[in-house]
Amino acid sequence: MPGNSRIAPITGSVIFLFVAPGVVAGLIPYWISGWQVGPALAGIEPLRWLGGSLLLLGAVLLVETFARFALQGRGTPAPVYPTETLVVTGSYRFVRNPMYVAVVSLILGQGLLFGNLAVLAYGAAIWLIVHLFVISYEEPTLARSFGARYERYKANVRRWIPRLTPWTPKE
C-alpha cells in the first residue's frame, strides 16, 4: 500500500529528529546555558532579536527538511536509512545543507538570545564538525549514490551560503 510505504521513513525521521538535532541543538545548549537569559552580548539588545529570528528560521527549516526527506526522498537523514531519491526541492533549491544550517541556526540563536558565549562557541564547533563530516563522508557518498545528478546539483547550489534565487534542475 502507498500509505504504508511512508510509515517507516516518517517514523524514522521523527525518531532521528529527537535523537540527533534534539540532543545537539536542544539538550546540549540547555546543559551549557540552562536556558537562562543573561545580559545581551556586548550590551547590544537587538542581538536577542536576531537570536529569536535564528531560532524561528532554524525550527521551520528543520521541520521542512525532515518532512521533505521522509515524504519525497522516502528515507531519513540518518545514514543507516538514507533517502531513495536525491532531494533537490524546497529549501534544497537554495542551499545544499539546509538541515545542518537549521541545526547551527538553532544553536547560534540560543547563544544570541541568552547572551551566552559558550553556546555560541559550541555552535561554531558543531558547524566545524558538520563541515568536516559533509566534505569527508556525505558529499562523496552522495556522489557515489546519485552520480551525475548530484554533481549537477553540487555545481549549482552552494554548500552553506544560500542562493538568492532557487535552482531548478533541468533533467
Image (cartoon, helix red, strand yellow):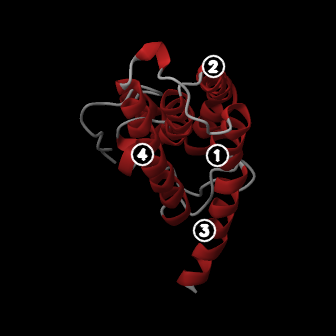
Give how far apart the Cα atoms at labels 2 and 1 are: 17 Å
Residue at position x 68%, y 40% in the image: 30
Residue at position x 58%, y 74% in the image: 6
Q: Nearer the viewer, mark 2 or mark 3?
A: 2
Point out which mark residue 56 bears: 4
Kindly indicate whether the residue at mark 4 contacts the one at mark 3 (C-beta within 8 angstroms): no
Residue 157 visible at all: no
Q: Seen in the image, is 23 located left or right of residue 149? A: right
Image position of 7 with respect to 129: above or below: below
The amino acid type found where label 3 is placed reads Ile
The amino acid type found where label 1 is placed reads Pro
Task: Give the structural element (helix, strand or loop) at label 3.
Answer: helix
* Quarter occupied by residue 168: top left
Task: Give the structural element (helix, strand or loop) at label 1.
Answer: helix
Extreme residue in the top direction = 42
The amino acid type found where label 2 is placed reads Ala
Task: Give the structural element (helix, strand or loop) at label 4.
Answer: helix
The amino acid type found where label 4 is placed reads Leu
Image position of 137 with respect to 73: above or below: above
Q: Label 2 belongs to which residue?
A: 121
Residue at position x 66%, y 49% in the image: 22
Q: Residues within 10 Å of mark 3 (few under 14, many from 20)?
A: many
Give how far apart the Cα atoms at labels 2 and 3 are: 33 Å
Kindly indicate whether the residue at mark 4 contacts the one at mark 2 (C-beta within 8 angstroms): no
Q: Residues within 10 Å of mark 4 (few under 14, many from 20)?
A: some
Q: Label 3 belongs to which residue?
A: 10
Give how far apart the Cα atoms at labels 2 and 4 are: 20 Å
